[in-house]
Amino acid sequence: MTTSGTTTFDLQVDELIAEAFERCGMQMTYGHQLNSARRSLNLMFLDWANRGLNLWTIEQAVYPLTNATNEITLSSDTVNVLSAVIRDTSQSPSVDITIDRISREEYLNIPDKTTTARPAQYYVQRANTFKVFLYPAAQSNFYTFVYYRIRRIQDAGAYTNTTDVNFRFLPCLASGLAYYLSLKYAPDRTAALKQIYEEDFTRAALEDRDTASVSFVPDVGA
């Protein structure tokens, strides 16, 4: 028995749309349906950003700090900052030092936000312009803000593109788009397609997680 020897299966955007329409019991026949489906696909990507971590969208980034810097603007496709350190490059080798995330209220209550030293805390402002506020402000040019961020899933774009989605989520992607399209074109199938979509998403999300070992030690002195 022979096998393909490949593990590269993927779907272009137009193939994905065709699959979703078939699940709705339809053949896509009009150009506006293609545009409608791509719009639904992009809306679904935004919803996935609200559902939790997508491991393939987590990446490390760096932001070199200059003297007295206490506010930085991150890339506009940033969804959230997961963790961060301050890298001190004045030493060889450089040293990464833990920095704590604080709330908006905690940052607001800091009396003098222009104090300079090695930054020890950061507040994340998740607005249209994504900013990070550091306290204390950087005291020298030897500090770098190193962080792990969640970025947005890339837009669908051209119909001949493949999607910016890990292969584990392809079944979920097809069932999700079918559900979205059913809201507009096949409402009689919406309930069934939604159930399939949620089941597919749950399976993919359970697999899309960090599997490193974690140990919990009770504090017997508490």
Image: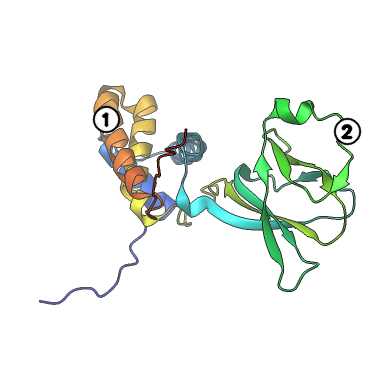
Q: Is residue 74 above or below residue 63?
A: above
Q: Is mark 1 on a helix, strand or loop?
A: helix
Which of the two labelled residues, at mark 2 and mark 1, occupies the earlier sequence position? 2
Left or right position of 153 against 184: right
**Residue sitting at x 44%, y 39%:** 219
Give residue 172's position: percent from left, percent from top.
Answer: 33, 43
**Residue sitting at x 60%, y 47%:** 83
Q: Mark 2, mark 1: which one is toward the viewer? A: 2
Give residue 78's position: percent from left, percent from top.
Answer: 63, 45
Asked whether 79 or 70 is in front, the reply is: 70
Q: Tag count in the figure?
A: 2
Q: Is residue 163 above or below residue 221?
A: below
**Residue sitting at x 32%, y 39%:** 202
Give residue 4's position: percent from left, percent from top.
Answer: 23, 73
**Residue to which mark 2 is pinned:** 112
Label placed on residue 69: none
How dense is the environment of label 1, judged by Cα within 10 Å: few (below 14), some, or many (20 and up)? some
Measure how far apart labels 2 and 1 are at the Cα level: 53 Å
Q: Is mark 2 on a helix, strand or loop?
A: loop
Q: In this view, does 181 lie above or below 69?
A: above
Left or right position of 114 against 220: right
Give residue 99's position: percent from left, percent from top.
Answer: 68, 47
Amino acid type shown at disc 1: Gln
Farthest residue toward the front? 221
Label placed on residue 195: 1
Amino acid type shown at disc 2: Asp
- Could you tell me if residue 64 is visible in this image? yes
- Could you tell me if residue 164 is visible in this image? no
The quadrant holding residue 203 is top left
Asked whether 146 or 2 is in front, the reply is: 146
